[in-house]
Every structure is written in structure tokens, then in C-alpha cells.
Image (spheres, rainbow, N blue to C red):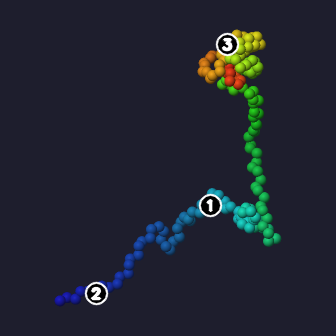
């Protein structure tokens, strides 16, 4: 009977390194680390009263931390700027009225009666605004469609009137 051979210890083979050989330095230096996008925030004074925190001036040598003043405001823009003035409001909703004069006549002439209101508005508007006006008045809401240059809808109390240039 043959005796099996005794296993012998063999050194593990080293893996070949990829890249530059070890005795020779790499021709390219490693890249610089990327700087952070945002700077580090200043340290805060946690001992400030009321739960508030203020930036601490680390250069203050008196033992007390002094609040750091806020940064200065940004410089003005390099291009010219201008402000727009707000238009004066007329108190007229353009969807309901486009004539301040007609609105004033209607507000003054609307009474509790739709019949009296429409006659008064038609008479005053035709005389004072130099045109023929059609007027509709009602105690209830109504819908209408009119193509005209001058128009106005006014509600006073329960009476709603619509007048337009014919």
C-alpha cells in the first residue's frame, strides 16, 4: 500500500497590481478634493437667552461672545430700474361698467321701484350723456348680452339696473 503524499504549505500567489508599478510613482497626481458648495455656517452661541442663537465672533478676547453684525445688503443692479406707479382706481368694475358718468346717474336715479328707476335713468342719461340709452331694471338677477360703447350695471338695495348706449 502506498502512502499518500503529505500536503505541503505553499505561499499564496500575489495578485498583480494594475496601474503603475510600485517602485515608480504614478505620472498623474490624484485630483484635488471638490470644495463644498456652501460655506460652513458660523458657530452659534447656545448660551444666548430666550432659546435664540447668535453667531459668535471667535476673535473677541474678552471672554464674552459678541454678536456678529449681519452682512451688508447686496449692491444695486447694474442695469437701470424703475418703479411703476399704481393706476388710480375708479371704483368701477370693467366687467359691469365702463362709464363713471353713467354710473353716477344710475346710482342717483335708482329708487325702490324698477319701473320708476328705468324711466329716470333713461331720461337723465339721454339728456346728460348726449345719446339714446336703453335701460333694464329688475328686482331679480338677470342675464344679458349687449354690444355697445357705453354700458353700466348698478345695484342699489334690491333693484338692479343695466343701461347701455343704443
Q: Which numbered disc covers residue 6?
A: 2
Q: Quadrant of the C terminus?
A: top right
Would you place residue 7 above or below residue 15 in this image?
Answer: below
Query: Which of the two marks, 3 or 1, is nearer to us in this view?
Result: 3
Q: Position of residue 82 (x, y in %)?
A: 76, 37
Residue bearing mark 1: 35
Q: Position of residue 112 (x, y in %)?
A: 71, 20
Q: Nearer the viewer, residue 58 or 97?
A: 97
Query: Which of the two marks, 2 or 3, is nearer to us in this view?
Result: 3
Residue drawn 75% across the image and 67% down it: 58
Circle 2/circle 3 CB separation < 8 Å: no
Residue 99 image-quadrant placement: top right
Q: Position of residue 75 (x, y in %)?
A: 76, 48
Callout 1 environment at 10 Å: few (<14), some (14 to 19), or many (20+)? Answer: few
The secondary structure type at the circle numbered 3 is strand
Callout 3 environment at 10 Å: few (<14), some (14 to 19), or many (20+)? Answer: some
Residue bearing mark 3: 134
Give the CA separation, mark 2 to mark 3.
Answer: 123 Å
Q: Nearer the viewer, residue 58 or 92?
A: 92
Q: Quadrant of the N terminus?
A: bottom left
Q: Earlier in the sequence, mark 2 or mark 1?
A: 2
Amino acid at each position: 500500500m502506498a502512502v499518500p503524499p503529505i500536503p505541503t504549505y505553499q505561499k499564496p500567489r500575489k495578485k498583480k497590481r494594475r496601474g503603475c508599478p510600485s517602485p515608480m510613482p504614478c505620472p498623474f497626481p490624484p485630483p484635488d478634493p471638490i470644495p463644498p458648495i456652501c460655506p460652513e455656517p458660523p458657530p452659534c452661541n447656545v448660551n444666548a437667552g430666550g432659546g435664540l442663537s447668535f453667531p459668535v465672533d471667535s476673535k473677541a478676547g474678552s471672554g464674552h461672545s459678541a454678536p456678529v453684525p449681519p452682512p451688508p445688503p447686496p449692491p444695486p443692479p447694474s442695469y437701470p430700474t424703475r418703479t411703476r406707479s399704481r393706476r388710480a382706481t375708479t371704483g368701477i368694475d370693467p366687467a359691469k361698467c365702463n362709464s363713471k358718468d353713467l354710473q353716477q346717474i344710475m346710482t342717483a336715479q335708482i329708487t325702490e321701484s324698477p319701473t320708476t328707476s328705468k324711466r329716470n335713468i333713461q331720461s337723465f342719461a339721454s339728456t346728460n350723456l348726449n345719446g339714446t340709452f336703453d335701460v333694464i331694471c329688475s328686482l331679480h338677477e338677470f342675464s344679458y348680452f349687449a354690444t355697445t360703447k357705453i354700458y353700466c350695471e348698478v345695484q342699489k338695495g334690491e333693484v338692479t339696473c343695466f343701461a347701455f348706449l343704443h
